[in-house]
Amino acid sequence: MRVMRRKLVSFAGSKLSIEYSGPRAAALVDYLYGRVPPGPGDGVVDKGASPLVYRLADDGRRLTLCRGETLLFDGLLATQSEANLADALLGDSCHHLAKESRGGLLFHAAALVDRARGRGLLFPGAIGAGKTTLAAWLALQGLTYLTDELVFVPEGADEMHAFPRPLNLKSSAEPALSPYFDFEAHEAAILRGPGASLIPPASLGSHDVVSRSGVGLLIFPRYVPNSDLVWQALSKAQAGLALMECLVNARNLPGHGFAEIARLARATPAYRLCYGGFDQLEDRLEMLLDGL
């Protein structure tokens, strides 16, 4: 009889647990959540599981994933099945963490650290803004990758906590990164799905296992093919409105988080970045960051 083990995931005032058995299930949990700090409930499953429990099983032939009593995935053991299951688990678990988040501001955002200048960079943006591709490119330029999905700023704090996960890169974005990243050389570490691939941060060569940093700069990115480069300083009011658009837990916060948004916008320089390709940023990145 296989022993069922558990990974406790706590982030942004929310928590869940993932129970798993079998070698491939264990490898997937480590691949997706291995950078999440160990919780007090990690290990062999006994009593006291969190209210929301995912169960991931590998019987040597099939992979299955359940949320409580709801079946989310059932497929034959294969690389494609692993990618589809990973996408289902990662997406569903991030949705739950965001839905239940309290105690601070949770943004749909990427985050990196500029070690040379001692600044944490927060990139809030809607789906399709190009955050993941930009985060990958910046990491390849020497900045330290934290996350491409969820960033939490605790109430009253000037520190951001990034949810550590593999980059979820759309297949359509690969050509833009190909001049800077050797996909073939890292193929063994990439988990490919039908429309996107998961890439471990270690493959980029610059990532942080702590996933925390001070918030030193707000950058609101937008990729528009063939557009001119725009680097625009935002007023505190403009930054606050842009932050509200990327806040995912407003309904759980006093005053929908407005006071905390205003505090963060007042304390942090903010810019809007619109670009049409990384060739526009290659020669200007150092100049832009040095000039802040």
Image: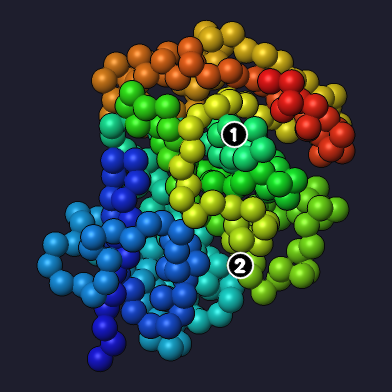
Q: Position of residue 122 (x, y in %)?
A: 56, 32
- Out of 113 and 152, give the one closest to the viewer: 113
- Where, by quadrant of the figure, is residue 14 drawn? top left
Q: Quadrant of the C terminus?
A: top right
Q: Is residue 100 left or right of residue 95?
A: left
- Where, by quadrant of the figure, is residue 174 drawn? bottom right
Q: Amino acid at mark 2?
A: Leu
Q: Secondary structure at mark 1?
A: loop
Q: Position of residue 23 (x, y in %)?
A: 43, 83
Q: Looking at the rendered structure, which numbered label has been put on residue 118?
A: 1
Q: Quadrant of the N terminus?
A: bottom left
Q: Amino acid at mark 1?
A: Gly
Q: Which residue reaches farthest left?
A: 47
Q: Secondary structure at mark 2?
A: strand
Q: Position of residue 101 (x, y in %)?
A: 31, 38
Color style of the picture = rainbow
| Residue 43 drawn above or below residue 259 | below
Asked whether residue 88 is in view, the answer is no
Q: Is residue 104 left or right of residue 282?
A: left
| Residue 91 drawn above or below residue 242 | below
Label total for image:
2
Residue displayed at 48% across by 32% down: 214
Dot placed on the residue nearer the N-terminal end, 1 or 2: 1
Q: Is residue 282 left or right of residue 4?
A: right
- Residue hosting label 2: 191
Q: Residues within 10 Å of mark 1 (few under 14, many from 20)?
A: few
